[in-house]
């Protein structure tokens, strides 16, 4: 027992690093009460160490803490994505007016960000229904507080409250689904045990369907899939931009990691033979992927259609991120390694372009005090470099070459066509045309319209540009040379306990 | 042909990018340096194009054989090692030209060079304008020289953004609407093309020369060989539902660019709102990409369907010709008239293509080149008068021949070339197209010739309204065409004249390729076997 725990701890280094970092951040905050600026540095170092540990895990494949958590390349990949996002968000925070104006609370901000990262790391690795709920809760609780961080602003508190209510409801639904599944499988909690139980005995298909629908509701809330997305626009608008950006990338990544692992491991039928390489079958002809397909169509279509009408850039990006979740769900539908690889590729790309867009929104908001699409009028002439970067991110979000976003779309569509899901591919393709319309609205305001009011150039400091360059360069380079991300995704597919 | 170890096609494609970087580095106030930098870059392109013209081996046919392609450059671009469930991803930087693409390369280089001079008086943001123009140039040139479908697609899409900005920032009053309409339409076409491209990718494999392992490929030449289609893949099997779907997706992608009725509605808006030089590029080069794509990709990759859909294509060609001409006749706006005449003239290209014989196809490719030069002239001519009078209303003019005699002279050449007067280049290509089509689709061709009459009608009517009759006193003091404008128009007029008298200068380039294409599509289409 002790042996096992000690061995498990050795595989638990990224999470341990984050936990230690969380405690340290609070301690440092208490000790250096007059200099709260130190705390984000502690958090930055802690998360960097955690990411470094996660990178060390890319080769291993183990189950630790008696099956609660698994350590495998798939989890490591998502930990790296989440950790990188957290690092970038901390860098963004240096220039966030919302965060810097409440400098006394920097301790809470940084430590909660670390806690949220920890929750997401656990989400990426959990292989047990209980662990799933616990990690979702850890992530959720930290993010509720952070969403309401700028408590002086009324919409921030509103965002926080909405987030809690929706979060409580969906976790409740999910728990209900889990309890049904628990009963159906005769007390299995680990995903692999669920799989064995389902494969062995005949289970009422209706009960299984209800249970999965309820669990999908809980996970759909995390990835903001329609119709569980209602919290997204309000929370994204009300929360500080940095937190919005973090939620839109990291929270989604953790949700997807959990969704893919849960459905793949629990419902795979390893006895089916004769499938083409890289495909797998679902148990008992339980076609959960069809549910996901419907979810995907709803998510991307609604996200895109509603985004067209948004005038607040944060809301626009919120709906756009809903649409992107829809695209990524397409990769889950096909039940093939190609599909999952496409999702992983998309996450790398999405991290770059989405964080980039939010970063610019934050910079502009700090200078002009507005996130309204009208305040971007003539920005191309006031701040050309920032505007060109924004165009690159938006073109990438729309999936047009030569940007990384195109590669993401290319691999998703490739996976769909390879599995002969043509109609879904066509829906996805048409959706990306719709999305272009609202991205271009912002571009139009920046370049085709003359500035309203102030026409003076907006200046930014060198480090601000440097952070931007970190995001722009890979967005362009990966569009033309994408071997590294594809190889990374290919290497990160294997999950513990699956062939 | 290499310079500094880099092939001529790479140079001709990326010289504008070099120019773009130079333009971006020039300080804001030095506008004339920007213009000259752009002119220099495009001039280098013209020189390279002329070199290609003279060293092009007219005997080689190309189309589906690597040996027939000239100035080939083939380098591995992306190579991702094999995983069992994905196979190896191998994409090549693969360029080459044959008789189909060389006329387009010449046209692109020439039109872009002239477009720089037509943009000499741009008032706002010269730096951005020239940078976008040069980026657009690279995209267009790349499309015509790429032989790897992935590369082709990247170039195809690279054009969208610069074109959006060029119309949207420097265009006329309704520029925003026109720009976004162009952008959305074209993107819709390209995503459909993307899906067809991926379907082709997963159907075609070639053996890796080193290991013999079969790998998926974007190589266009490999996609043309029925033997490379893998059994059980998406596009294997003759006449399957999927093949039809892929062909139609590709067709819509290209049809939007041509534009083929009913996908043409972006064109009048875009042409009218775009600044003169951009209208010239749109009509002169961009429209050709649609027909070029059909000939380079749709026809040889789906030969059996190219034959199957030949008569529907002839039918839409007929609609394009007659409908375009009728619309042109109804216009008050000079530029809109030319825009609709483009639709009509592109219809002749389509008609020639649908004939599936040498005359028709040669006519089509030659018409692509001729339309490029003639329409470019027409748009430049509209630009000249609009710069002076700031109106394009046809009824506002009259008797311009008196105030602007030189202008009227050069304009007459363009107008007569457009209506197909013998002795000018337009006549040769139109005659070939109709001749070819007559053998295949008699009735459709007979009705299509109505288009010629209509074209003569609106062209002459316009001539009469603008240049003849009582001079309008408002324009009595208009200066005649100046040296710079002359410089943009005269080369085109000379080409139109020379090719009208001795078309072999251009026909020689294309005949063997076009012959081969016709043979290939007809024979392979009739006898092809595809393991389902």
Image (spheres, coloured by chain):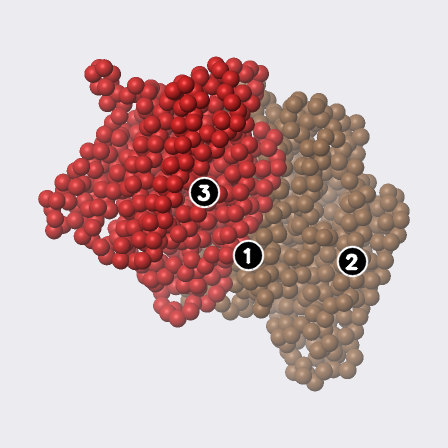
Q: Which chain contains the residue that carries disc 1? A: B
Q: Position of residue A272 (x, y in %)?
A: 54, 16
Q: Is residue B265 left or right of residue A138?
A: right
Q: Is label 2 in contact with label 1 (beta carbons under 8 Å)?
A: no
Foreground of the two, A91 or A480:
A91
Give the mark toward the camera: 3 or 1: 3
Residue at which label 2 appears: B323
Q: Which chain contains the residue that carries disc 3? A: A
Point out which mark residue A228 bears: 3
For chain A, give the colour: red
Residue positioned 31% across, 32% down in the render: A134
Residue positioned 39% across, 41% down in the render: A169
Label 3 element class:
loop
Foreground of the two, A435 or A392:
A435
Spatial CA distance of label 3 from label 1 is 36 Å
Residue at which label 1 appears: B164
Q: Position of residue B4 (x, y in %)?
A: 49, 41
Instruction: State which tag comes first along the sequence, 2 or 1.
Output: 1
Spatial CA distance of label 2 from label 1 is 27 Å
Residue positioned 36% across, 25% down in the render: A127
Q: How many marks?
A: 3
């Amino acid at each position: 027992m002790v042996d096992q725990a000690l061995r498990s701890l050795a595989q638990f280094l990224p999470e341990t690093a984050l936990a230690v970092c969380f405690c340290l951040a609070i301690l440092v905050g208490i000790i250096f009460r007059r200099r709260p600026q130190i705390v984000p540095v502690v958090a930055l170092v802690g998360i960097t160490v955690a990411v470094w540990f996660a990178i060390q895990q890319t080769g291993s494949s183990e189950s630790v803490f008696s099956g609660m958590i698994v350590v495998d390349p798939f989890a490591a990949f998502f930990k790296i994505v989440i950790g990188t996002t957290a690092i970038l968000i901390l860098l963004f925070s240096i220039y966030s007016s919302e965060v810097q104006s409440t400098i006394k609370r920097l301790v809470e901000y940084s430590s909660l960000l670390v806690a949220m990262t920890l929750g997401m790391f656990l989400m990426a690795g959990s292989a047990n229904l209980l662990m799933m709920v616990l990690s979702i809760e850890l992530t959720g609780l930290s993010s509720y507080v952070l969403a309401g961080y700028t408590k002086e602003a009324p919409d921030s508190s509103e965002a926080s409250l909405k987030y809690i209510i929706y979060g409580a409801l969906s976790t409740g639904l999910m728990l209900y689904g889990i309890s049904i599944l628990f009963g159906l499988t005769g007390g299995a909690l680990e995903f692999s045990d669920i799989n064995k139980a389902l494969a062995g005995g005949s289970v009422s298909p209706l009960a299984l369907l209800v249970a999965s629908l309820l669990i999908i509701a809980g996970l759909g809330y995390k990835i903001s899939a329609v119709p569980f997305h209602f919290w997204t626009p309000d929370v994204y608008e009300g929360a500080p931009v940095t937190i919005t950006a973090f939620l839109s990338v990291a929270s989604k990544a953790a949700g997807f990691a959990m969704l893919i692992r849960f459905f793949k491991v629990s419902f795979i039928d390893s006895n089916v033979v004769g499938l083409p390489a890289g495909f797998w079958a679902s148990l008992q002809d339980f076609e959960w992927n069809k549910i996901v397909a419907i979810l995907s169509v709803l998510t991307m279509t609604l996200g895109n259609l509603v985004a067209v009408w948004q005038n607040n850039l944060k809301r626009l990006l919120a709906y756009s991120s809903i649409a992107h979740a829809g695209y990524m769900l397409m990769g889950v539908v096909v039940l093939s390694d190609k599909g999952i690889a496409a999702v992983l590729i998309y996450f790398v790309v999405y991290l770059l372009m989405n964080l980039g867009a939010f970063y610019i929104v934050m910079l502009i908001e700090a200078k002009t005090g507005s996130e309204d699409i009208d305040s971007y009028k003539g920005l191309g002439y006031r701040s050309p470099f920032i505007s060109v970067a924004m165009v690159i991110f938006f073109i990438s979000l729309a999936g047009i070459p030569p940007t990384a976003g195109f590669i993401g779309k290319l691999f998703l569509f490739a996976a769909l066509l390879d599995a002969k899901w043509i109609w879904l591919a066509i829906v996805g393709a048409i959706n990306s045309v719709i999305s272009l319309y609202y991205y271009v609205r912002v571009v139009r305001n920046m370049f085709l319209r003359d500035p309203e009011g102030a026409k003076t150039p907006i200046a930014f400091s060198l480090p601000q540009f440097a952070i931007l360059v970190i995001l722009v360069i890979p967005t362009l380079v990966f569009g033309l040379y994408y071997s590294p991300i594809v190889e990374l995704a290919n290497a990160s597919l294997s999950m513990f306990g699956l062939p | 042909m290499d310079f500094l170890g880099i092939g001529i096609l790479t140079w001709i494609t990326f010289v504008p990018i070099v120019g773009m970087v130079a333009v971006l580095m020039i300080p804001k106030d030095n506008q004339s340096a920007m213009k000259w930098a752009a002119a220099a870059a495009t001039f280098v392109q013209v020189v390279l194009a002329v070199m290609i013209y003279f060293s092009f081996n007219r005997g080689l046919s190309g189309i589906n054989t690597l040996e027939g392609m000239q100035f080939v450059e083939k380098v591995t671009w992306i190579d991702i090692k094999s995983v069992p469930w994905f196979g190896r991803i191998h994409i090549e930087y693969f360029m080459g030209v044959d008789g189909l693409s060389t006329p387009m390369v010449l046209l692109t280089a020439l039109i872009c060079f002239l477009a720089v001079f037509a943009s000499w008086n741009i008032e706002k943001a010269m730096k951005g304008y020239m940078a976008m123009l040069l980026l657009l140039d690279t995209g267009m040139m790349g499309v015509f020289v790429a032989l790897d479908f992935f590369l082709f697609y990247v170039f195809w899409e690279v054009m969208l953004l610069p074109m959006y900005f060029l119309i949207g920032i420097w265009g006329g009053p309704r520029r925003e609407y026109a720009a976004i309409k162009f952008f959305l339409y074209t993107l819709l076409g390209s995503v459909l093309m993307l899906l067809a491209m991926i379907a082709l990718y997963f159907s075609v494999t070639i053996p890796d020369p080193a290991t013999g392992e079969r790998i998926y490929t974007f190589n266009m030449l490999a996609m043309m060989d029925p033997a490379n289609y893998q059994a059980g893949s998406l596009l294997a099997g003759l006449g399957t539902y999927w093949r039809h779907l892929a062909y139609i997706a590709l067709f819509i992608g290209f049809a939007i660019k041509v534009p083929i009725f009913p996908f043409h509605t972006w064109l009048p808006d875009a042409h009218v709102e775009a600044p003169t030089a951009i209208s010239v590029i749109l009509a002169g080069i961009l429209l050709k990409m649609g027909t070029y794509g059909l000939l380079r990709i749709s026809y040889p990759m789906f030969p059996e369907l190219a034959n199957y859909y030949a008569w529907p294509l002839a039918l839409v060609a007929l609609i394009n010709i007659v409908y375009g001409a009728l619309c042109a006749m109804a216009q008050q706006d000079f530029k809109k008239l030319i825009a609709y005449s483009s639709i009509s003239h592109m219809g002749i290209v389509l008609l020639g293509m649908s004939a599936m014989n040498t005359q028709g196809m040669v006519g089509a490719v030659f018409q692509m080149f001729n339309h490029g030069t003639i329409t470019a002239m027409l748009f430049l001519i509209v630009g000249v008068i609009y710069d002076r009078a700031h109106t394009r209303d046809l009824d506002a003019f009259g008797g311009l021949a008196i105030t602007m005699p030189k202008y009227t002279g050069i304009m007459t050449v363009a107008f007569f070339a457009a209506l197909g007067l013998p002795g000018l280049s337009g006549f040769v290509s139109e005659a070939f197209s109709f001749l070819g089509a007559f053998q295949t689709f008699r009735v459709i061709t007979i009705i299509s010739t109505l288009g010629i009459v209509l074209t003569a009608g609106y062209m002459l009517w316009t001539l009469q309204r603008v240049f003849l009759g009582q001079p309008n006193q408002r324009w009595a003091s208009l200066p005649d065409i100046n040296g710079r404008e002359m410089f943009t128009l005269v080369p085109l007029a000379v080409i139109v004249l020379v090719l009208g008298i001795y078309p072999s200068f251009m026909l020689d380039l294309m005949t063997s390729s076009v012959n081969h294409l016709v043979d290939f599509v007809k024979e392979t289409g009739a006898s092809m076997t595809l393991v389902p």
